[in-house]
Image (cartoon, rainbow, N blue to C red):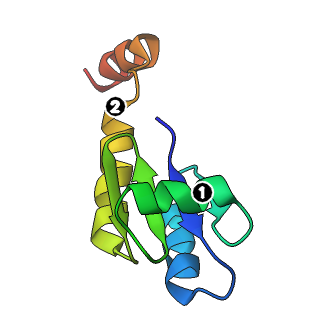
Amino acid sequence: MNVTVYTKPGCPPCDATKRKLDKLGVSYEVRDVTVDADALARVKTLGYNGTPVVECGDVHWQGFSPDKCKQLADNLTAAQPVNEQAAREYLEETA
């Protein structure tokens, strides 16, 4: 699932959000609302007037929220397909 962070230059909450997502290992696309008219329109369509805005599927929020970043990372990890061969090998090693 794609994660997008709508941001603008000189925005400390934007920078904090990107650092938190990086720390959690979440891949994301950055869209600068000051130079990308489509990004600005998307933020407004979602009902927000400021940055950062994080969007992933039907989930989105505005502002720096470490808890929501963590929840997003957990949900993305849970949604990844299981490597069945690696799981079998792990279970055999621990049996």
Q: Is residue 93 above or below residue 29?
A: above
**Quadrant where the C terminus lies?**
top left
The quarter holding residue 80 reads top left
Tell me the residue that label 1 is attached to: 39
Callout 1 crowding tier (Cα within 10 Å): few <14, some 14–19, many ≥20: some
Say left or right for 29 vs 53: right
In front: 48, or 15?
48
Tag 2 or tag 1, which sits nearer the N-term?
Answer: 1
Residue at (64, 76) in percent of width and height:
8
Residue at (40, 21) in percent of width and height:
81
Tag 2: amino acid: Ala
Say left or right for 1 vs 27: left
Q: Is residue 25 visible?
A: no
Q: Is residue 33 visible?
A: yes
In front: 11, or 41?
41
Residue 61, how many percent across, how many down?
34, 64
Tell me the residue that label 2 is attached to: 79
